Amino acid sequence: MTETLDIPLLIEALKKALGYHGEATIPLHTPSFEGNEWRYVKECIDTSWVSSVGSYVDRFEKQLAEYVGVERAIAVVNGTAALHISLLLAGVQSGDEVLIPSLSFVATANAVAYCNATPHFVDSSMETLGIDVERLSLYLKEITKLTGNECINKHTGNRIRAIVPMHTFGHPVDLEPLIELCDEYHLIMVEDAAESLGSYYKGKHTGSFGLLSAMSFNGNKIITTGGGGAILTNSNELADRAKHLTTTAKTPHRWSYYHDEIGYNYRMPNINAALGCAQLESLPKLIDNKRKLAQRYSNELKDIAGIKFLEEPMFAKSNYWLNAVMLERNFAQYRNDVLEITNTNGIMTRPAWNLLHTLPMFRNSPRMEITESQNIADRLINLPSSASLVVSSI
Ligand SMILES: *Cc1c(COP(=O)(O)O)cnc(C)c1O
């Protein structure tokens, strides 16, 4: 049975939610610089501390760790680098497999590949857009055997070392059952919290559950450092290792260049951290605005047949980083029309990512049956989500 989606009505509702009167196109996401950004960055330039020396990196790391509620944060060049080092420190080795959702940004899979490990793709749930723990549990029961403290994929003979839940568009994954699963199968959890700064699972900040977690401060994320990322952990030992590995493994010395292992030049420059310090100061306000915008979408879209605004899961408080609507099952054929018409009407919208297991470099990677992720990708549309949309349209 096909039903008709009232696209003109949808456009009107979106315009109303956005307070849009046909000016320039509304972008999907823009950063907001309304605090001390200019002042802190200028100070870096005035003092010439723009790069690998300066106090903003330490300050950013402390501010971030405090906000999230973890012992330590290590600032790095981008979220992908944060994932790479987190996986290395989780003990992911050449030949291992790492469970990741197929519905994610390519960085999640690339970081696994950088460790010479193989991404093993899992399906996501329609409710949370994150890993479907229930179905994963059945799948692991079928395809793995436990040898000592190791989880072995019976089909490939490889060890499955870790799992990387990703909090899609800021909405937290159901972490409690996932943590139980990790215990049962001796999997180390590394959170891809790139999109979920400011999101909480049962009152506790996302990115504080994994042994290590990765955040991103790319230009399109809830706060930005231009480009940047961070590794979060409650282990001081892992944090020290992360700092060492991301700063070329140089041993501290006044003048000698001595490096005691192969390290990475992943350090966040001071000028980027300066921007980050100012952005963190504004974060509560940004989240507030984003949640207000989500509320507006929710109100305006609630009576449109065939489309559902994506709300935060019951157990979560989401940062609503990127708002989304889901077309109902029998309205899926309208996805491209909606994308086409919104974009020509000045409202920038985008589909979800192409599923990672369909990309050429990951096509032969192991995976469970992936059906819901495809279903989500076929029906989901992201909406303009800048925090500034709330302020400017009042
Ligand atoms: C943004 C993002 C990353 C990291 O991106 P960088 O651009 O390297 O900072 C990783 N995973 C997900 C899901 C992301 O959205």
Image (cartoon, rainbow, N blue to C red):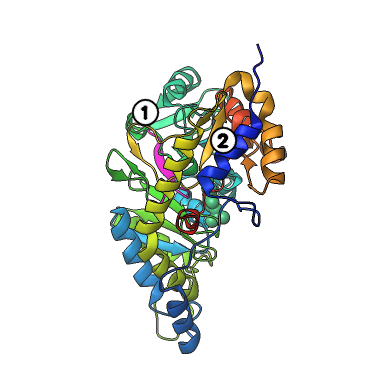
Callouts 2 and 1 close, C-beta under 8 Å: no
Is residue 95 within the magenta segment?
A: no
**Spot occupied by residue 118 in the image (x, y as percentages of width and height):** 58, 39
- Quadrant containing the C terminus in the rendered view: bottom left
x then y, percent, for residue 42: 48, 82
Element on which disc 2 rests: loop
Residue 181, disc: 1
Residue 180 in sight from this viewpoint:
yes
What is the number of callouts on the image?
A: 2
| Of the two numbered discs 2 and 1 in the rendering, the one whose residue sits closer to the viewer | 2
| Range covered by the magenta-colored residues | 186-197
In the displayed structure, 39 sits above or below 350; it is below
Marking on residue 48: none
Res. 203 image quadrant? top left
- Give neighbour class at mark 2: few <14, some 14-19, many 20+ (Cα, 10 Å): many
Side of 257 relative to 232 (left or right)? right
Q: Say left or right for 215 vs 327.
A: left
Kind of residue indicated by mark 2? Leu
Image quadrant assignment for residue 328: top right
- The residue beneath circle 2 is 103
User: Secondary structure beneath disc 1?
Assistant: helix
